[in-house]
Each structure stands twice: as C-alpha cells, then as structure tokens.
Image: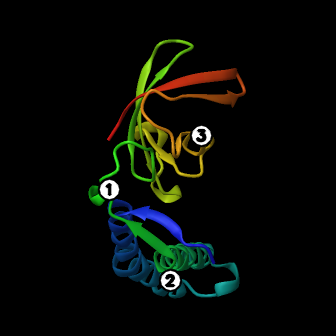
Amino acid sequence: MIHTLMTKEGEKKLRKKLKYLKEIKRPSIIISISKAREFGDLKENSEYHAAKEEQIICENKIKDIEKKLFYAQIIDISKNKNKKKIMFGSLIKLINLNNKKKITYRIVGDDESNIKKNLISINSPLAKKLLGKKKKNIISLKTIKGNIKYKIINIK
C-alpha cells in the first residue's frame, strides 16, 4: 500500500478521534446493546438493531483510522526550509488573475483537507498544479466555470 502523507497536526487529530472512538464511543455502544437486550426478543427489537448498526459503523471507523495511521508518512512541515518551491505543507498566497481576489491555501493530506479552512488536499487539482512552482509563477486551472489563472504571490 502507498503511504499517505499527513502533517503532524493531522496525525494528532486522527489519534484524538481514534481515542474517542475506542474509549468513549465504543463503551457507550456496548452499554446501549446491553440495555436493548433487556427489551426481549432480538428479532423485533429496533433498539438492539440500531445499536448493533452503530457498533458496525464505529468499528469500521476505528479500522479505517488505524490503517491510515499505520500507512501514514508524517511530514513535519516546521522543518521545511525550502521556501522557494511549493511542496507538501506549504502555505501559498495566490491572486486569482480573473477577478483579482487574493486567497491563501495550505497543502495538506487528504484527511486534513477542509476548503472552509483553506486546507487543500495534495491530491486536489489545484495542489497538483501548484507543486514545484515558485513565487511569481502563473498557473492555469480548468474548472466547470472555465479557466482560472492564479499567480503565486508568496510561499511560506
């Protein structure tokens, strides 16, 4: 399997979520299943079936997170000394040359991406266009609304 790139912050968030699922959510579901069993016949017991379904979802999430962490390649972006080229973890300030709006993005792993927080996945079309580029480079990105041209203003 291919390693998944992840920042140290992303790893921390996944570990926190895993801990919550294992130490809080899982025991809570087990209690719900126990209480639902007390209602009698399991074939027609909707509380029991709902709790079992929740248990399956929880266990699948746990397995998924454990797998991601096992195959993760953690990148400490604070140790990135190359500020001239865009790479994983770079904070990039761009100007949209079509509408003159400025925007800042950080390139992160898939699980960390959140467009509302301007965190874009390394596998997103924009990040793929930006990787390896330098300050003042111009890139063109095809979108549903047409071509958008961006100029790189700054890299941190």
Identified by mark 1, the residue type is Asn
- Quickly name the residue at label 2: 33
Indicate the position of residue 124 as horizontal and vertical percent values.
59, 46
- Quickly name the residue at label 3: 129
Choose between 106 and 52: the one closer to the eye. Answer: 106
Residue for point 52% across, 74% down:
58
Residue for point 32% across, 67% down:
12
Indicate the position of residue 127 as horizontal and vertical percent values.
54, 43
User: Position of 117 compared to 81: left or right?
Assistant: right
Lower position in the chain sequence, tag 1 or tag 3: 1
Q: Quadrant of the N terminus?
A: bottom right
Task: For label 1, count other residues whose C-alpha is less than 10 Å away and answer few (under 14), some (14-19) or many (20+).
Answer: few
Give the secondary structure at mark 1. loop
Q: CA distance from mark 1 to mark 2?
A: 48 Å
- Quickly name the residue at label 1: 80
Q: Quadrant of the C terminus?
A: top left
Identified by mark 3, the residue type is Lys
